[in-house]
């Protein structure tokens, strides 16, 4: 029987790696993204031959549009078994100097899809008694984050979303988990200077950044081996937070 996974932020490094892994695992894919048409096209072309792929462009800053797109996806796809919330942006600056526009962008991309997409799709999961929701958090979701206060706020909200929704859906067969990466070698770290990146690396016991495919490894584990897990936020940071 066909099974489908929806991945938000699919044009990003982590979202793209997860999409590739899900394709290998035999999932049909709905790739949701903001504006990177070229990135999504390249991703779709790189997926396992024969994969059924649908790309959906959506502006997360427009709540009405996101709500409409989510409802249409629910009407069109009754076989979505997996939701991957991988969309995310970061903004590194002093909290009191952050513009309202930047703050609203963080809220729109990092939090808004959790509500609109999940609300639209979980009724089908509940009816079938099965489903997985996996969100990408950050080590800063539960720890102090100087210069990334607003970003950490959004990831803290994501982690409470994970635990609370898991408690709500656990007796309905739907599992909800999150992954909290440390430094991963993606575009999101481009806001660090060379010296800041070197200092960051020196504080990681493994002395390297994580790879997006290592996050995909953990997603695969949760979908195949970790069937007795829900409400968990799993840290993957090379020992940074020890």
Image (tube, helix red, strand yellow):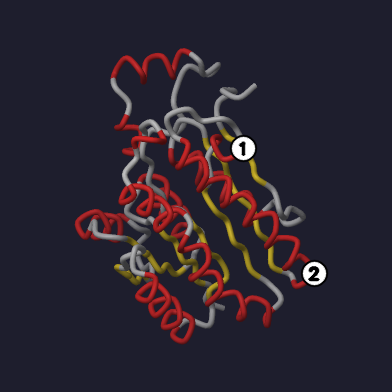
Per the rendering, the mark at residue 142 is 1
Q: Quadrant of the N terminus?
A: bottom right
Q: In terms of depth relative to the viewer, which is nearer, 95 or 179? A: 95
Pick the front one: 156 or 22: 156
Frontmost residue, 103 versus 56: 103
| Position in image of residue 34 (x %, y %) | 30, 60
Residue drawn at x 53%, y 83% is 78
Tag 2, which secondary structure? Answer: helix
126 is higher (above) or lower (below) than 198: below
In this view, 229 is above or below 217: below
Residue 124 left/right relative to 57: right
Alpha-carbon neighbours of circle 2 within 10 Å: few (<14), some, or many (≥20)?
A: few
Q: Within the image, what quadrant is residue 198 found in?
A: top left
Q: Is residue 40 left or right of residue 84?
A: left
Q: Give percent across and percent down for residue 24.
A: 46, 57
Earlier-in-chain disc, 1 versus 2: 1
- What residue lies at 56% left-to-right and 35% top-to-bottom? 139
Q: Which residue is mark 2?
A: 171
């Amino acid at each position: 029987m066909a099974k489908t996974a929806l991945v938000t932020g699919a044009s990003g490094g982590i979202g793209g790696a997860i999409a590739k892994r899900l394709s290998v695992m035999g999932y049909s894919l709905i790739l949701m993204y903001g504006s990177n048409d070229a990135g999504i096209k390249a991703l779709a072309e790189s997926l396992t031959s024969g994969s059924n792929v649908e790309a959906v462009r959506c502006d997360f800053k427009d709540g009405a549009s996101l709500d409409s797109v989510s409802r249409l996806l629910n009407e069109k796809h009754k076989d979505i078994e997996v939701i991957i919330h991988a969309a995310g942006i970061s903004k590194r600056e002093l909290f009191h100097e952050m513009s309202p526009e930047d703050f609203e962008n963080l809220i729109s991309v990092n939090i808004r899809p959790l509500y609109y997409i999940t609300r639209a799709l979980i009724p089908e999961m509940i009816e079938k008694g099965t489903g997985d929701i996996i969100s990408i958090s950050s080590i800063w979701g539960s720890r102090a984050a100087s210069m990334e206060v607003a970003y950490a706020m959004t990831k803290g909200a994501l982690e409470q979303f994970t635990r609370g929704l898991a408690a709500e859906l656990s007796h309905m067969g739907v599992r909800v988990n999150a992954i909290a990466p440390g430094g991963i070698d993606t575009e999101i770290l481009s806001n660090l200077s060379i010296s800041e990146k070197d200092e960051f690396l020196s504080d990681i016991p493994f002395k390297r950044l994580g790879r997006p495919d290592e996050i995909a490894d953990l997603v695969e584990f949760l979908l195949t081996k970790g069937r007795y897990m829900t409400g968990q936020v799993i840290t993957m940071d090379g020992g940074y937070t020890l």
